[in-house]
Amino acid sequence: MCHVAQIQGAPSAEDIANSPTLKNITQRGFIVAGSAFKYKNLNIRNPSTGKQEGFYVDVGKALARYMLGDEGKIKWRYAAGTALGNVLFVDRGDVDLLLDPVAQNPDFKKVVNFSDPVLLSGSAFLVKKGSSFRGMENITDDTTVIYDKSNTEIGFVKAKHPDAKYIAFWDTLDVLDALQSGKGDVFTTFYPGLLNMAARYPEYMIVGRYTDKYLPMCSKKDDLVFLHYLNGFLKTLKDSGEYDRIYDKWLTPYGANQRPVGVTAADLPPMKPGDWAANNYVAPDANREAIIARAEANSPTLARIKQRGALIVGNAFKFQRFSFPSPDRGEPQGFMVDLTQSLARHILGEGGKVIWKVIPDEDDVTPVQRGDVDAIIDIVYLGAQMEKLDVVNFSEEIFRSGGVLLVRKGSFIQSLNDITDQTRILSARGGEQTLRRIRVRAPNATYLSFATYDEAFAALKEGKGDLVSGLAPYLFNCAVQDQNYTLVCKFLERPTSVVSRKDDPAFNDYINDFLRSWRSSGQYEKMFQKWFVPYGGNMIR
């Protein structure tokens, strides 16, 4: 059996001279690698040892040994936690490379280099061990398939088995409850998410991958020498047998062979922007003129907006940095306000042509149903079963809110894996779903509940707890009060979209086209940096 010590390939003097990344690494004496630390057995912090561990960690150690002769010469930096955020992390030069599950989105390829595949991901199924179910071919009309709504590839399953039964959730704990209670037969999502569950609940295993997504290392776009060096390392790692040893240690026990055997980047088919919508970023539609023309001809909402000369938008104005009245003049401001003004400018040519209607509850879609507003641009939750899709349209994602932690800056707590039996966890009424996720991980921690988030935050500042758990918009309200505190660790996903009338799909298409062009123009990133980043904004990318 080969070991890491047997694969070494220090860069040549010529490579170092021609590669800014190799030059930086050799001068500082260690590699800086980025990861979101989200997936068990891929790259996650062990709460007992405080060290990173998993498949990607061992690949990173092998790279450090290969390059610098010492597997300890690699340091990890927490990346944003989403594909787009992680790619920007590399592009800015915050890390030398990304070792994390990022699929090869063609738009990301414009700003980073993709190495040969490190791992083969894709969508598959989670079943109980001992089940006869092995994949798509075993689905019948009587099968109940549970799926993660964020996985757009469920369409492949529905197309092949339209008469099977389907249940959708956002929260994996709801998925687990449904599986264990017999409400569903199988669960499908992307491989890293399935691995999270299989590694945590040993009675389940992964079977039947039905799509292929090759996961590379990401490095700086302008450094081809470093890219070639990484590909040389991967070839040596695989040829030596060391790759198989690492794979068998971390991944083999949970089923599904995800080895990218014999595949290089050159072997992969050309990618289209639409192939990768699940990465939270879609390039502007090549046929956007047709989308706009269709909306102009068929959207009653767009016609009304143009006739009255103003866009009517509902918002509760509850959340700092999202949408809130300015303290001096009481005028609307925030990320959602800037977004709305950009949409008004897109439709009417002027950003100021917005009529705001204050709605009592940001999660109530009835103002759109009644026609009181053209759209709701606020933090609207789809519902555990996506039941609101039956009555209104949701656009593509603006960003993902969800459950996060609020901690003092510099706290060692950066993820759920850092929570121990000694951790004091504060929460507020309404945050029960986020607590549920934490209690599974740390049932013996100390839990203190308060009537409001302000009371929980006051207790944190008084030293009565180590963190506040809750929904990101509420915790942003706290973080802006005291810049000694920040948001970390998004552990529950709640996508946020523009809400419009169900009977006007053309207007929803128009909004989606606007959101794509808005992202592509750089305005999204500019607004995000302005309103969120100083307070832990990467937690909602």
Image (tube, rainbow, N blue to C red):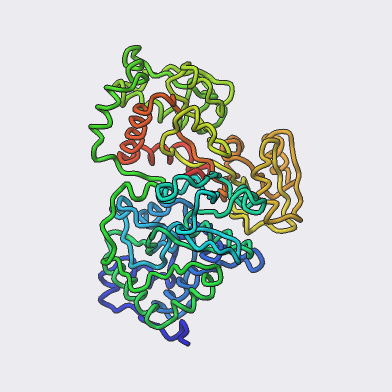
Residue 155 vertical placement versus 71 (above, below): above
Q: Nearer the viewer, residue 72 or 186?
A: 186
Find residue 452 and report its image quarter.
Answer: top right
Location of residue 298 in the rendering, given as x and y in whole percent from the top left corner: 30, 22
Q: Is residue 326 visible?
A: no
In the rendered structure, the answer to whether residue 455 lies left or right of residue 265 reads right
Location of residue 392 in the rendering, given as x and y in whole percent from the top left corner: 47, 28
Q: Nearer the viewer, residue 152 or 225?
A: 152
Location of residue 472 in the rendering, given as x and y in whole percent from the top left corner: 57, 40
Residue 2 vertical placement versus 198 (above, below): below
In the rendered structure, the answer to whether residue 214 lies left or right of residue 73 reads left
Find residue 13 and report its image quarter.
Answer: bottom left
Find residue 128 and report its image quarter.
Answer: bottom right
In the rendered image, the residue lying farthest to the top is 308
Location of residue 231 in the rendering, given as x and y in whole percent from the top left corner: 32, 72
Residue at left 42%, top 34%?
Answer: 395
In the rendered image, the residue lying farthest to the front is 141
Q: Nearer the viewer, residue 486 or 254?
A: 254
Q: Nearer the viewer, residue 288 or 86?
A: 288
Residue 92 vertical placement versus 373 (above, below): below
Residue at left 59%, top 67%?
Answer: 51
Residue at left 37%, top 81%?
Answer: 239
Q: Is residue 432 visible?
A: yes
**Number of numbered discs on residues:** 0
